[in-house]
Image (spheres, grey):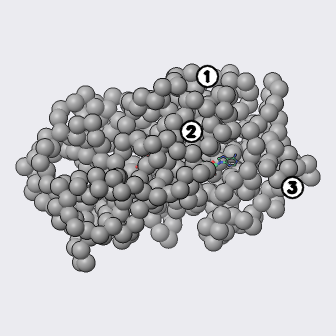
Amino acid sequence: MKLTKREVLGAMATVPLAASCATTGTARAPDTIVVGAGVFGAWTAEMLRRTGRKVELVDAWGPAHARASSGGESRLTRAGYGTSRRYSEMAAESLEEWKRLSKDQDLPLFHNAGVLVFFDQESEYATGSYQTMRALNLRTERIEPEELRRRWPQIDWSGVKFALLENDFGALMARRSVATLVEQFVRNGGTYRKAAILPPKGGERLDSLQTAAGETLYAGEFVFACGPWLGKLFPEVIGKRLFVTKQEIFFFRPQAGDTRYSMPAMPGWIDFFGETVMYGFPDLESRGFKVANDVHGAYVDPDTNDRLTDATSLAQVRAYLGQRFPGLKDAPLSETRVCQYENSSNGDLLIDRHPQWANALLVGMGSGHGFKHGPAVGKAAAKLLQSPSAEAEPIFRLAGKAEKHDRFVH
Ligand SMILES: Cc1cc2nc3c(=O)[nH]c(=O)nc-3n(C[C@H](O)[C@H](O)[C@H](O)COP(=O)(O)OP(=O)(O)OC[C@H]3O[C@@H](n4cnc5c(N)ncnc54)[C@H](O)[C@@H]3O)c2cc1C
């Protein structure tokens, strides 16, 4: 069935007809069911489809819907990860897939804005990022304060010792990207269904899922990429190892006609100072200059939290904005968004088998940095599912996820 963009954006309400026959007994069941059409589930479904499997993607609300972690406007993609070379490689490998996906679209999925990372001191993280990116042949410039002032006079560089510019990276249009990917997945033979999956039950193997509407969905393999909801499906296995935090995003309106805060004058940026990490985007597609505090917020339930920002968070961001970007000091707020990080204890992602069912994978814990890695996560998950005797890569194992929230990977 050909799927139009209109159907994707309409949360695909019209698609499941063909899919429901496929899984409830009247036609061949899919080889694999992927639960969760956020960035991880969508790319995992796509990578599994490319192996020749018949794949069904299921979501309770729709691809990158408003409360999914992938449902935001924009996400940074960058490769600097200190000495964690695996994440740098994943970001670089993923960027090629994002660019391919973006290439033939009417509206861009990727803006090559560049990403400028400010550091207030020399650190292992900064040196490691620079060396790793150079070793991977990723264009990176180390820029000293004098040149920073010359190239970006609209930024107040007080306290910044140097910055790293990742020239080939930038911004992914998050919701649009996932919707486009799911559209292409279905166009190329995958199926999509809107259904809420109940916490799975099984013996030695998992052979089916129950939906809240009372259907039974059969498949040979299962992937659960349920983002912040993963703990609700697997309270025993995941519950205490997932830390879902409230994250707030603010968009500010530059002065009419002011080009200093848009591309190409302004790249994406991250500001490491003291214990704080602020980050943001240029005025992408005229939605406003985005600023967010990366510090983890209060624990929230993705089903019940109202998406309202706090006055204290806004005051903090405004104070920061006025100091670092003086030309935006009195800029009015044009939009706010509330989303959630689905954190592991240390920030490492989860791509592992369910401890009881070898034919089921658990994929998630994007921890505030996962979006960019979607294609590489999908590839790693597909590889694990294809090799029944293989173990998960050590950093992605469930066993490494503790019950104490103590972020390490940025
Ligand atoms: C504010 C914010 C800023 C971020 N910034 C960046 C950034 O700059 N760069 C970056 O790389 N990453 C960033 N991230 C992180 C990244 O966006 C997330 O890690 C990533 O989107 C997580 O994707 P996911 O597929 O795991 O989860 P989700 O997108 O939440 O998808 C999970 C899906 O599972 C579905 N689901 C759950 N339970 C069920 C069920 N029982 N039945 C059926 N479906 C179900 C949900 O409906 C949902 O659609 C940011 C995150 C936030 C919140």
Residue drawn at point x = 51 percent, y = 66 percent: 105
Q: Is residue 385 visible?
A: no
Residue drawn at point x = 85 percent, y = 49 percent: 215
Question: In this orientation, which residue lies closer to the viewer: 135 or 300?
Answer: 300
x then y, percent, for residue 392: 58, 25
Residue drawn at point x = 79 percent, y = 37 percent: 220
- Residue lying at the far right in this picture: please name it: 26
Disc 1 marks a residue whose amino acid type is: Glu
Local crowd size for mark 1, using a 10 Å CA cut-off: few (<14), some (14–19), many (≥20): few
Quick one: SS at disc 3? Answer: helix
Q: Tell whether circle 2 marks a residue whose Cβ is less than 8 angstroms from ligand 1.
A: yes
Question: In this orientation, which residue lies closer to the viewer: 190 or 160?
Answer: 160
The image quadrant of residue 8 is bottom right
In the picture, which quadrant includes the C terminus? top left
Please say if 256 is above or below 157: below
- First reached walking from the N terminus: tag 2 or tag 3: 3
Please say if 201 is above or below 229: above
Residue drawn at point x = 48 percent, y = 25 percent: 404
Q: Is residue 179 visible?
A: yes
- Judging by the rendered image, the residue that carries numbered circle 2 is 364
- Judging by the rendered image, the residue that carries numbered circle 3 is 21
- First reached walking from the N terminus: tag 1 or tag 3: 3
x then y, percent, for residue 98: 48, 53
- Judging by the rendered image, the residue that carries numbered circle 1 is 391
Local crowd size for mark 2, using a 10 Å CA cut-off: few (<14), some (14–19), many (≥20): many
Disc 2 marks a residue whose amino acid type is: Gly
Left or right position of 155 against 332: left
For the residues labelled 1 and 3, the Cα–Cα distance comes to 34 Å
